[in-house]
Image (cartoon, rainbow, N blue to C red):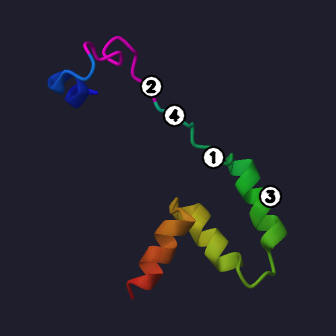
Amino acid sequence: MKLGVATGVIAVNPLVAAPRPRAARSIPRHWTPEQAREFLGLMEGDRTYPIWAFLLGSGLRIGELVVAVGER
């Protein structure tokens, strides 16, 4: 639009008065300690239990664990 105004193709940029859109912010969802304990109770005996226990205890996200393991 700026180029159109500069070259005389349009007289006024109609976007100047338009409000800029704002990105919607999402609120991260976290488990309560009770939910985490219930999940670990359900996973007990599963071969992935140590990974889940580590993630919940450390606060790491799954993607951060994958990156950390991939750097070895």
Q: Amino acid at mark 4?
A: Arg
Q: Is residue 49 left or right of residue 22?
A: right
Query: Of the residues tagged 2 and 1, which is closer to the observer?
Result: 2
Mark 3 residue element: helix
Q: Are marks 3 and 4 in contact (CB under 8 Å)?
A: no
The label number, if any, that marks residue 21 in the structure image: 2
Q: Please rate how many residues cluster around mark 4, counting C-alpha atoms within 10 Å: few if below 14, some from 14 to 19, many from 20.
A: few
Q: Amino acid at mark 1?
A: His
Q: Nearer the viewer, residue 37 or 12?
A: 12
Q: Closer to the N terminus: mark 2 or mark 1?
A: 2
Q: CA distance from mark 2 to mark 1?
A: 28 Å
The vertical placement of 10 against 61, above or below, is above
Q: Closer to the N terminus: mark 3 or mark 4?
A: 4
Residue at the spot of label 1: 30
**Dividing the image into 4 quarters, which one contains the C terminus?**
bottom left
Mark 4 residue element: loop
Magenta range is 11-22
Residue at the spot of label 3: 38
The vertical placement of 11 against 52, above or below, is above
Q: Please rate how many residues cluster around mark 2, counting C-alpha atoms within 10 Å: few if below 14, some from 14 to 19, many from 20.
A: few
